C-alpha cells in the first residue's frame, strides 16, 4: 500500500525504544491515527521537529488494515506551537489535544473538527495578550468539539420531555442527561446544576461559528465550569489538565 500524505496535528507522543516514538495525530483526511515513527529522535531524521507536541505537520503515513499501528515515515513541520507569555494558553493547547484524543474514534475523519482545533491552536500559540479572553476561546473549543462529536448539550428545550424551558430565572442542567431540564423533569435527579440566564446563553452560542453575543466574564466562567464538569461526566474522569483550567465560579449544585 502506498504512503499517504495528510495535514495533521500532533496530539501525543510516547517514547518507543531509544530513538523511536509512538505518535497520535489528528489528520484532516483520515481522522485520528496512531503510528510508529521509527528513528524519530535520531539526528537529521526525516521528522526534524515535525513531531513536536501541538505542532501541525504534513505527514507521510503507511496505513495498516490489520488494526495495528500505522507507520509514519515522514513529518514536515508546517506550524509549530510556540510558548508565549501565558502558561494558561499552553495548558489550553494541551487540553485541546486531549479532547481530540478522547472524544474521537480512530480513523474517523471529521475535517470540520480538524479545522476547529487547528484554528484554536493558532490563536493560543505564542500568546502575548492578557488572559481574560482565554476562557471564551476554551469555552468555544469545548462546545464545538462536543457538538461535532455528537455530544453537544441541549439548551433550547428540556432534554427529557422536549418541552419549553422557563423564560426567566435559573435553569436546571443535568450532567447525566446532557442538557437543560424543565421544572417538571428536574425532580429527583442527581448531578444537576443551576445555570444563570447568561451562562445558558453562553452555552447555547459558544460553540457556533461566527460572532456570538456579548457575554460577561462571569457568564463565560460559569458556563466553562459547567461544561468542564459535563465533559468529566461524559468521560468518566476529568481531563488531565482540567483542574488547572477550571474557573473559580459559584453555582448551585444538588
Image (cartoon, grey):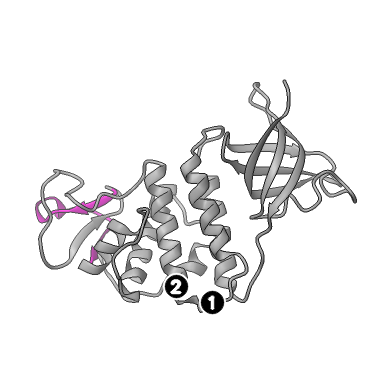
Q: Secondary structure at mark 2?
A: helix
Number of on-image labels: 2
Asked which quadrant contains residue 86, the reply is: bottom right
- Circles 2 and 1 in contact, beta carbons < 8 Å: yes
- Give the image location of residue 154, x and y in percent: 25, 49
- Give the image location of residue 18, x and y in percent: 86, 47
Q: Secondary structure at mark 1?
A: loop
- Give the image location of residue 210, x and y in percent: 36, 56
Residue wearing tag 2: 133
Return the mark for residue 74. none
Question: How dense is the environment of label 2, judged by Cα within 10 Å: few (below 14), some, or many (20 and up)?
Answer: few
Q: Name above or below for residue 30 compared with residue 100.
A: above
- Give the image location of residue 82, x and y in percent: 67, 65
Residue wearing tag 1: 129
Q: Residue at x 70, y 37 (%)?
A: 35
Specify whether 10 is left or right of 237: right
Q: Residue at x 38, y 64 (%)?
A: 224
Specify whether 74 is left or right of 167: right
Asked if residue 182 is among those painted magenta in the image, a careful observer would answer: yes
Numbered range of the magenta stretch: 178-195
Residue in front for this viewpoint, 60 or 193 = 60
Residue in front for this viewpoint, 248 or 43 = 43
Amino acid at each position: 500500500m502506498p504512503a499517504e500524505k495528510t495535514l495533521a496535528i500532533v496530539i501525543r507522543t510516547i517514547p518507543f525504544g531509544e530513538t523511536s516514538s509512538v505518535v497520535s495525530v489528528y489528520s484532516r483526511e483520515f481522522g485520528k491515527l496512531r503510528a510508529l515513527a521509527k528513528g524519530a529522535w535520531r539526528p537529521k531524521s526525516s521528522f526534524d521537529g515535525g513531531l513536536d507536541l501541538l505542532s501541525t505537520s504534513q505527514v507521510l503515513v503507511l496505513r495498516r488494515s490489520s488494526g495495528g499501528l500505522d507507520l509514519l515515515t515522514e513529518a514536515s513541520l508546517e506550524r509549530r506551537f510556540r510558548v508565549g507569555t501565558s502558561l494558561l494558553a499552553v495548558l489550553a493547547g494541551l487540553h485541546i489535544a486531549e479532547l481530540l484524543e478522547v472524544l474521537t474514534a480512530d480513523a474517523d475523519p471529521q475535517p470540520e473538527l480538524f479545522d476547529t482545533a487547528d484554528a484554536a491552536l493558532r490563536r493560543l500559540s505564542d500568546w502575548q495578550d492578557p488572559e481574560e479572553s482565554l476562557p471564551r476561546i476554551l469555552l468555544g473549543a469545548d462546545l464545538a468539539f462536543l457538538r461535532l462529536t455528537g455530544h453537544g448539550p441541549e439548551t433550547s428545550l428540556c432534554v427529557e420531555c422536549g418541552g419549553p424551558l422557563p423564560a426567566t430565572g435559573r435553569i436546571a442542567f443535568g450532567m447525566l442527561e446532557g442538557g437543560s431540564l424543565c421544572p417538571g423533569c428536574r425532580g429527583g435527579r442527581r448531578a444537576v446544576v443551576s445555570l444563570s440566564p447568561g451562562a445558558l446563553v453562553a452555552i447555547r452560542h459558544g460553540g457556533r461559528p461566527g460572532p456570538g453575543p456579548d457575554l460577561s466574564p462571569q457568564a463565560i466562567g460559569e458556563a466553562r465550569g459547567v461544561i468542564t464538569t459535563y465533559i468529566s461526566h461524559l468521560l468518566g474522569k476529568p481531563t488531565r489538565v482540567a483542574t488547572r483550567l477550571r474557573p473559580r465560579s459559584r453555582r448551585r449544585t444538588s
